[in-house]
Image (spheres, grey):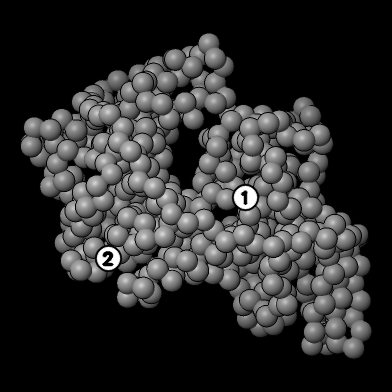
Amino acid sequence: MHDCFGIGDIDNGFNVTHSNIDQLMINVPSDQQLKAKQFIADYANKRTIFPYAAVGMRNNDLTQALKGANYQITDDAIRRIMNNNVNVNPGKLQRQMMFRIGRTLDGGYEPPENFDIYASLVSKLVERYSLNYKATGLPRKVTYWEIWNEPDLIFFWNNNTPQVFYEFYSKIAKAIKAVDPIAKVGGAAVAFAYNLDGAYIDGLLGYCKTTETPIDFLSWHYYHSEPQSIMDVGYHIQKTLNKYGYNDIESHCTEWNSTAIGTVNSLTKLQSAQNAAFLTSVLICMQYSKIDKAYYYRGDGASFGLFNDQFNPQSWPNKNFCTYAAQGFNLFTRMFETPYILTQDNNFDTGLTTLVGENEVGNKINILAANFEIDTNFIDTNLPPNGYSLYQQYYLDSNRTTNQLNDDWSKAHWFGGVDPSTILYDNEVRQKKLMLQLPVIGTLPTRNISYDQSHTGLTVNITNIAENYKITAYLIKEGGRLDRMTPENVTASVNSSLINNVLSITDLGVTPSTVTLYTIDFTG
């Protein structure tokens, strides 16, 4: 529940002058951008849970801060998230969610004006979504609560005195635990996960330890062009947790992607087969590091999202929402069919990363292979290289105001059934001059990656195989099918042999910017 434009947000104070709101305007035609900014500000403010929180805090008046609470909109969103059909995914997984305490990007840079009132507002949400979740219509309680987002960036937390954030975190964490003692609380969703002795990782952990402030997980973000470096970040985080005696608390990467820079060109690259190879490589590397949960930014059709409004390249008259990046996630979820990771000879010093797993009864193996070669042009703002499509993106339709979204479907889908014209707010976050940002110390170690193997295809040898077998292979590549989540079946192009109990698989189609899944069923 992060950057959802009001849903899950406590006290947004959007206005059209905020600079980072431009990130949401990337695909809007220039002559429509002012209207789009006005729409976003009004839309997010109207969907905010407590539309009078700011004025209530300013006046030290909890009753005023609670005025006109918009629970229905967030209620509806959480219900839709949690009421998933478990039978449509391989692991029959029930959806969980993390509730991020704070605001959407550009909902206001300043710390809340009254920490006590803010804690009281948070308590209301914990009561609603953790304690009384059945009465709210949820099948399960909300367990995880993340406190704030990227306080190490001044355009999320315009204060460079870390003690102020520590006190805020402590007050909110204790308020959550007072309502639900078994809730899991944590933070601080830092932008710079690799920051030696940083104020919002080391400093926060030290503060929690000395003041006995509860912390059940440490959260951080990862935007980097080298998939293997996620293991270095995970190791660094775990080493830091150990340093302060938090060996057993969880490590959560609550934002990750290959770039945090949003332009028309960079966003189209994020939907490419190249990014499918990147994100699948990262997911594989995460299995070998101390990372308990990871949240890709983003999973929708907005900027950085996994879905779009494109034409089907193999059937131009038709449209489809799928992207190669989304297909990468789809192939990764197939690994839940074979959750027991097998030992493999892979030192992660090539562009080719693999993950091998078997099922409980031992009659099925899945092999996921991602081939990503670092390209310095990948995360820049230039057009994609020749042979890559410029995918059609969604953009905001600013032809209507928020109040005109009053048809039955819009009210139900965007406002929890409430008529937006009836929602009023007074949530101005009075912006002060931006302070100096605290320095970031240290850089991730450089890995020596060789890409020679990336250009010769894939050869996998699996030992101790004695049964008959059947291989099915699926391949993500640029120009491949996008009319469904499952990519092309390329079984016919894969060669295999079983000699002396060693199964060898050779696939010359595994070139840079591809992802392949091999499913091996043993029929003996």
Q: Nearer the viewer, residue 278 or 394?
A: 278
Q: Along the polypeptide, which appears first: circle 2 or circle 1? A: 2
Amino acid type at mark 2: Gly
- Identify residue for label 2: 206
User: Looking at the figure, which quarter contains the C terminus?
Assistant: bottom right
Q: Nearer the viewer, residue 319 or 26?
A: 26
User: Can I make out residue 517 in this image?
Assistant: no
User: Can I make out residue 421 in this image?
Assistant: yes
Question: Furthest-top residue in view?
Answer: 31
Counting from the top left corner in percent of width and height, residue 118 is at 18, 44
Amino acid type at mark 1: Ser
Q: Nearer the viewer, residue 207 or 365?
A: 207
Image-based side of 96 in relation to 346, left or right: left
Image-based side of 282 in relation to 157, left or right: right
Counting from the top left corner in percent of width and height, residue 269 is at 67, 39
Q: Residue at x 40, y 68 (%)?
A: 240
How far apart in space, not on screen, are marks 2 and 1 (Cα)? 31 Å
Q: Residue at x 81, y 41 (%)?
A: 479
Q: Residue at x 32, y 75 (%)?
A: 245
Counting from the top left corner in percent of width and height, residue 325 is at 65, 47
Q: Nearer the viewer, residue 12 or 125?
A: 12
Q: Residue at x 61, y 65 (%)?
A: 285
Which quadrant of the view contains residue 362? Answer: bottom right
Callout 2 crowding tier (Cα within 10 Å): few <14, some 14–19, many ≥20: some
- Which type of secondary structure does the marked residue at label 2 adopt? helix
Image-based side of 70 in relation to 439, left or right: left
- Which type of secondary structure does the marked residue at label 1 adopt? loop
Image height of 393 relative to 288, above or below: above
Image height of 469 relative to 487, above or below: below
Which quadrant of the view contains residue 196? Answer: bottom left
- Identify residue for label 1: 225
